[in-house]
Amino acid sequence: KNLSKVDVQRAKASVPHDRDSILALIEQAPGFQNFNRCVVNYLQTWMLDSSETYLRGALQDGGGSQDHITLLKFCQNVNKLLRNVGQLDRAADIIEQALRASERSGGVETADQASLLRQLGILRRKQKHLDAAEVAFAESQRISEQIGVLGTSDGALLLLNRGIVSIEKGDLQNARSMLSQAKSLANEAGVHDTNVGALIFRYSGRLARLLGDYSLAAEEIARAEQIYKKTESLDTPCAANVYFEFGELKRTQRDFEGALSSYQQGLDIQERLGVVDGMDGKAFVSAIEEVKLQLVEL
């Protein structure tokens, strides 16, 4: 999120004249926006490579000086970063290595194991291996129910992801059931007004659109946007995807100008975060190109 704040025009220099000269050169070429993007990409690559190298070493030696909870959280953060930039194979390899390390330490049926399986399922879903994703999610749910941790924010996210798989398989009725259960768990866990709730509302909006209830779709997506505003999380990949949902809804309603505006709003966030080359960023670019063609044809 902090990388979205990178802005060379706010940089300082010990000699003001030098700063003005440097900014003048940047403005001529490549331009401030392109320069900011290059800086973000460089920092992002460095952080990812450094974090992944450290994490792999820690997983191989059983965690070293890191306690198990800290290591798991670090693993999940690195996994999320890799997912956001579209490095799904690298992310899956990290999660599978973490699962093996957890099993070696005796954590076969623990909350950590359930969480890692959920992360693996998300990766398989994004890789379009929907059956493999469902296997990972089902095992995560089995463990969560057995040890009594399904009624948590993680449980809500798990059922949400099972619902997303159903959407992508075209089983909208099962998706409706899963998302309804996810909402109930989010309410019980007190996270319905957090970013967890925002994710559920976003996909509930997608499901409503696919079922033809455009009014409900608009309400659900708007609720997700409101939560991201409330939690000051608009400059995140998840919030950017809310504008993709707005774009898809407006496009379905043949409001192509509105769709283009929504897609562009989301893409702008993706560019500031340096994740435009990931799967979600590419989806924005593709949608914008398609809508522009539709506008030309009108």
Image (tube, rainbow, N blue to C red):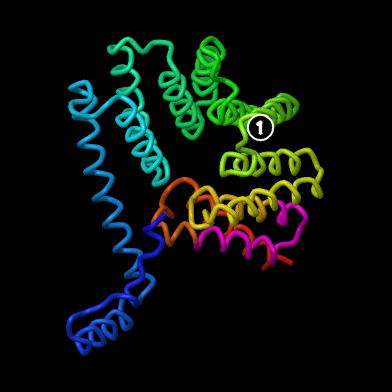
Residue 90 position by quadrant: top left
Number of numbered discs overlaid on the protein picture = 1
Residue 3 position by quadrant: bottom left
Across and down, in percent, residue 31 comes to 35, 77
**In this rendering, position of residue 159 left or right of residue 40:** right
Along the viewing direction, whichever of 175 and 5 lies nearer the viewer: 5
Along the viewing direction, whichever of 57 and 85 lies nearer the viewer: 57
The residue at which mark 1 appears reads as 167
Which residue is at 43% across, 15% downward?
110
Q: Main secondary structure of the magenta part?
A: helix
SS at circle 1: helix
Across and down, in percent, residue 115 comes to 45, 24
Q: Quadrant of the N terminus?
A: bottom left
Which residue is at 62% across, 35% downward?
190
Residue 90 included in the magenta stretch of the image? no
Vertical arrangement, residue 209 with respect to residue 264, above or below: above
Question: Which amino acid lies under the numbered mark 1 shown in the image of this protein?
Answer: Ile
Q: Quadrant of the C terminus?
A: bottom right
Along the viewing direction, whichever of 215 and 75 lies nearer the viewer: 75
Across and down, in percent, residue 146 comes to 54, 9
**In this rendering, position of residue 52 left or right of residue 277:** left
**In this rendering, position of residue 116 left or right of residue 215:** left
The magenta-colored residue range is 249-268
Across and down, in percent, residue 293 comes to 63, 63
Vertical arrangement, residue 134 with respect to residue 90, above or below: above
Which residue is at 50% across, 18% downward?
140
Which residue is at 24% across, 25% downward?
59
Most extreme residue toward the bottom, as rendered?
17
Residue neighbourhood size for the residue with mark 1, other residues' Cα within 10 Å, grouped as few (<14), some (14–19), many (≥20): some
